[in-house]
Image: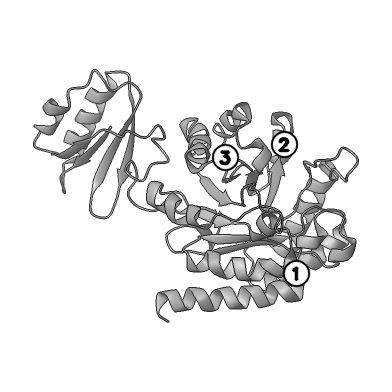
Amino acid sequence: MIIALRKETPREERERLINWLESYGVRTHLSEGEYQTIIGLVGDTTRIDTDLISGLDIVESVTRISEPFKKANRKFHPDDTVISVAEGTAFGGGQFQFIAGPCSVESEDQMETVAEAVKKSGAGILRGGAFKPRTSPYDFQGLHEEGIRILLETKRRTGLPIITEIMDIGHLPLFENVDIIQVGARNMQNFELLKELGRIDKPILLKRGLANNIKELLMSAEYIMAGGNERVILCERGVRTFETYTRNTLDLSAVAVLHELSHLPVVVDPSHATGHARYVRPMALAAAACGADGLMIEVHNDPPHALCDGPQSLTPEQFDDVARSVRKVLAALKGD
């Protein structure tokens, strides 16, 4: 249920209403926008008389939300959520971010070389996998704790915030100084992991599963937000279809739909979606044009010898070209 309050409602009357609503055993969420204040109710609202609330002088309207996702719902939070990662680095509210770096952390030299290059090209966040979920048990699985250490050292040297993927609840203590925790496509519906991430105060980048629809993605975000952590960034990374010319099928319509349904920022990963470096640039431009809040792009200093996903990785020079082109698209959209 959503209760829209009239403009300039006294704080005392608003708090009195909230206390009365919570006496019914529901949780309330206050969203103060520039033009309107919203009280969102989560829980069993069947016992609450909507006609009684509508008749209050301070109430403008009362709406019941039919969708099962509440906290992630734009009706619940009309304004775009802006998620700050570091000073000057945020997602949402018209701010666009580049996340760039290799699929997996391989060495200190590799990470520092790539980090310096992508930072120079305008990337605000460095990516790199320390734990790698691989289809084959014989493929490179990542450097684990050593990978985290290298990421943190690269962060110290370059100043770039870092993002890396978590695969197990037991690894959470290792992520204490990681700026953004990534939940990969294979773990999108690992609900115990999502609930645990809901108990921490750290941005979570949630990737859409290989065969999951938009509603299921938003319900996974709801798991995190229901636990108290509302700093969720959604990521479209392609879904599995019958097409074989690309690794997955990039669903750019999801960006528009997610922005309509939810207030959360949405980024696009054209690297995993296409699986081929030559397709990353056109898909990155299309993602920027359709309103994405950021891009997550794999960049490696030596793609042919990468230990993971070399075919879809850009060189630093290619990333620089993509970043320049994307900025031109963003400027055109703003009319600059």
Dot placed on the residue nearer the N-terminal end, 1 or 3:
1
* Dot 3 crowding, Cα within 10 Å, few <14, some 14–19, many 20+: some
Picture disc at residue 212? 3
Determine whether, in the image, residue 318 is placed left or right of residue 143.
left
Mark 2 to mark 1: distance in Å? Answer: 27 Å
Q: Residue drawn at (88%, 46%), measured in percent from left and top?
A: 140
Amino acid type, callout 1 = Glu
Q: CA distance from mark 3 to mark 2?
A: 18 Å
Nearer to me, 336 or 185: 185
- Depth check: give the residue in front, 220 or 227: 220
Mark number for residue 116? Answer: 1
Alpha carbon separation for disc pair 1 and 3: 35 Å
3 vs 2, front mark: 3
What residue sits right under mark 2 in the picture?
Answer: 167
Height in image: 15 above or below 277? above
Q: Secondary structure at mark 2?
A: loop
- What kind of element bears circle 3? loop
Between 203 and 16, the residue placed more toward the observer is 203
The quadrant in which the N terminus is found is top left
